[in-house]
Image (cartoon, grey):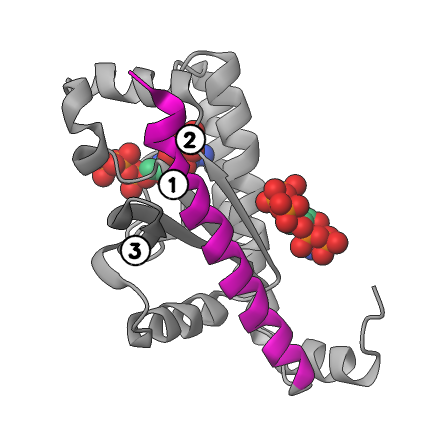
Amino acid sequence: MNWEALLAPYKQVVEELKVKLKGTRSQFEYDSSHSPIEFVTGRVKPVPSILEKAKSREIPLENIETEIYDIAGVRVVCQFVDDIYTIVKMLRRRNDFKVIEEKDYITNKKPSGYRSYHMIIEYPVEMVQGRKFVLAEIQIRTLAMNFWATNEHSLNYKYSGSIPTEIKERLQRASEAAFKLDEEMSMIKHEIQEAQRMFRRKF
Ligand code: 0O2
Ligand code: 0O2
């Protein structure tokens, strides 16, 4: 398998989506209105992770491009839960890509305690060989959801997917705490935004 050639369009997609979404964030800042985007990150799934996912889902290698949706992954992190739905609506309206699927793990959190909003998109990317349609996953979550997911992901990696029960229970409680944190912050959202408008962050 020529991984470099296969992953080249995915790299291009991640870079383009990062530029576009970071641009949206700047636009909100020029308008001096609250930006629903705190920060944007992105990555191309490393080859060992692609292989592992293909193996565990019994996906033949020739089907990975159509059956693994997150080879290109972009993450949009927000301050408030409301912001997530603002971004979702904004992304649905765009005409530079097509939304294929949406998964609301906020309304329906995963058994692990994971919360996030996922959008699978089909993105047309111009390669020297011509236009190619590539699948990409956009994860939209709050800072609190991101904190939880990052830590849980590390523990999953450490314990190869079998986190000890005691730690799992703590993660469940931490997920509840993150949910409460989001809820409490939403209650004082207008206060926070007013303060942030008054003292525009200069970093
Ligand atoms: P800046 O100067 O911080 O605005 P890149 O290729 O560097 O553009 P990449 O490869 O996705 O982006 O890098 P990474 O390390 O994943 O981080 C991407 C962006 O997210 C960086 O900003 C980080 O500063 C920012 N980031 C990561 N974690 C946090 C966090 O907890 N809070 C905040 N506010 N930002 C975070 P920029 O835009 O690349 O550069
Ligand atoms: P990475 O790069 O290690 O993050 P499905 O077939 O719908 O059950 P699928 O297709 O994998 O599953 O999609 P899903 O579950 O909607 O989303 C996949 C990605 O969401 C994962 O990528 C994670 O990034 C994130 N995710 C989903 N569930 C959890 C969870 O319980 N904890 C954490 N921390 N992240 C989660 P990968 O494949 O793990 O790749």
Of residues 166 and 18, the one nearer the viewer is 18
Please tell me how crowded label 3 is: few (under 14), some (14-19), or many (20+) other residues with Cα within 10 Å.
some
For the magenta stretch, what is the residue range? 1-30
In the rendered structure, are the residues bearing label 1 and label 2 in contact, judged by CB atoms less than 8 Å apart?
yes
Of residues 19 and 57, the one nearer the viewer is 19
Q: Which residue is mark 2?
A: 45
Position of 43 compared to 10: left or right? right
The x, y position of residue 170, in whole percent, is 52, 29
Q: Tag 3 or tag 1, which sits nearer the N-term? A: 1
SS at circle 1:
helix
Q: Residue at x 50, y 64 (%)?
A: 20
Residue 3 belongs to the span the image colors magenta = yes
Q: Which residue is mark 3?
A: 123
Q: Residue at x 47, y 12 (%)?
A: 159
SS at circle 2:
loop
The x, y position of residue 89, in whole percent, is 34, 74
Please tell me how crowded label 2 is: few (under 14), some (14-19), or many (20+) other residues with Cα within 10 Å.
some
Position of 150 compared to 107: left or right? right
User: What amino acid is labelled 2 in the image?
Assistant: Lys
